[in-house]
Image (spheres, rainbow, N blue to C red):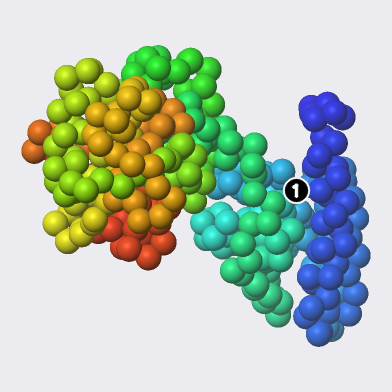
Amino acid sequence: MRSSETRQPEIALTERFQAILKSTFERAPFVSSVVVKRELADAGADLSVRVNLPRRRKVHVFVQVKRSGQPRVVREAINQVLRYRARWPNAYAMIAAPYISPRSGEICATEGVGHVDLAGNCRLCFGEVYIEVGGHPNPFAERRDLRTLYSPRASRVLRVLMLDPKRLWKVQELAKSAEVSIGLASRVKACLADREWLRLDANGLGVAEPRQLLQEWAGSYSFRKNVVTDYFSLQSVPEIEAKLAEVCSQRQWEYALTGFSGAARLVSAVRYNRVQAFVGAGLNELPGLLELKPVTSGANVSLLAPFDAGVFAGARTIDGIRVVSPVQLYLDLKSFHGRGEEAARALLEQVMEPSW
């Protein structure tokens, strides 16, 4: 039994869906009347809808209201409404949530269950009634959920998982490798499970849908999260990169190329004329040592103070120079529209996906 405090958000949603369901069903011109009721006690549904059709036919609809439309939550809700339909076989079952993603909508359709959301998406299919509206984006993005999954420290967990999506981890060793608490690793696990992007078995957990995870992550990431300072140098790009590697190695300053600089070492088609590199220490001294001049335009060097040390996870040495992992490269490239997105796609298709 859920407490009244726990139920409050769903009660508020239920009230909003009363009007939405009525207007949705009334779109069908042959529907003569629609009656929506709250809390169908004998069925356990959040809402019941009685739809009057031609020839005095009546259809009862049971609606389960959820605060989240993530696939795992939707599957659980479907199990609930299908139990109602087992008791009332002629009834129609529906799921209502603030946003039903295309993936969640597919799950509903496969199970013969309707859905509706606050964004304007819906699918109803029973008798003479067929109403489908899709393509509306999520205006109620679950910011708290996104902040949990793509926060700087949570991103450390994702990087560890994405460096080798086939590998399975125990939560404790995952947390240790990512240098985060077990509690945070568990919260990331729960967020991935809600999206059905998690692979679980007796040996541990891994990423089941790396491409989908990477795409959503890129949508929440910005290259500008890092502190970027632009410089100009009279030296050539290869000379700057070689000297950067030499100076940082001598002083044991962590560094790694990113963006087009890094991508060019993994994808041959990438062309670039600017050095882009994360530097973990020595940013006050490094420009002088490399003879770099700060500029506001015409830069050929960008040095980045990383928003979190996790950007260096999985960095490797290629031709004597450190380069961030393909995961970090992809995120940074996607922040640059046009050529950056093209380079990210090439990196994904030529380097990342073959290893998955």
- Badge 1: how crowded within 10 Å, few (<14), some, or many (20+)? many
Is 18 placed left or right of 350 in the picture?
right
In terms of image quadrants, where is residue 91?
Answer: bottom right
Name the residue at 38% across, 21% down: 178
Residue nearest the viewer, comparing 83 with 270? 270
User: Is residue 324 among what the camera can see?
Assistant: no
- Residue 347 in picture, x, y percent from top left: 25, 53
- Residue 106 in picture, x, y percent from top left: 53, 60
What type is the residue that disc 1 sits on? Answer: Val
Is 4 placed left or right of 74 in the picture?
right
Is 182 placed left or right of 27 in the picture?
left
Residue nearest the viewer, comparing 23 with 42? 23
Is 145 placed left or right of 341 in the picture?
right
Residue nearest the viewer, comparing 80 with 20? 20
Name the residue at 64% across, 44% down: 142
- Residue 331 in picture, x, y percent from top left: 38, 46
Residue nearest the viewer, comparing 284 with 277? 284
In terms of image quadrants, where is residue 287?
Answer: top left
Which quadrant: the N terminus? top right
Q: Is residue 86 above or below residue 182?
A: below
Which quadrant: the C terminus? top left
Q: Is residue 316 above or below residue 219?
A: above
Give the residue number, with chain letter if any, for mark 1. 65
- Residue 286 in picture, x, y percent from top left: 30, 28
What is the tally of numbered marks visible in this picture?
1
User: Is residue 293 among what the camera can see?
Assistant: yes
Name the residue at 68% across, 75% down: 131
Q: Secondary structure at mark 1?
A: strand
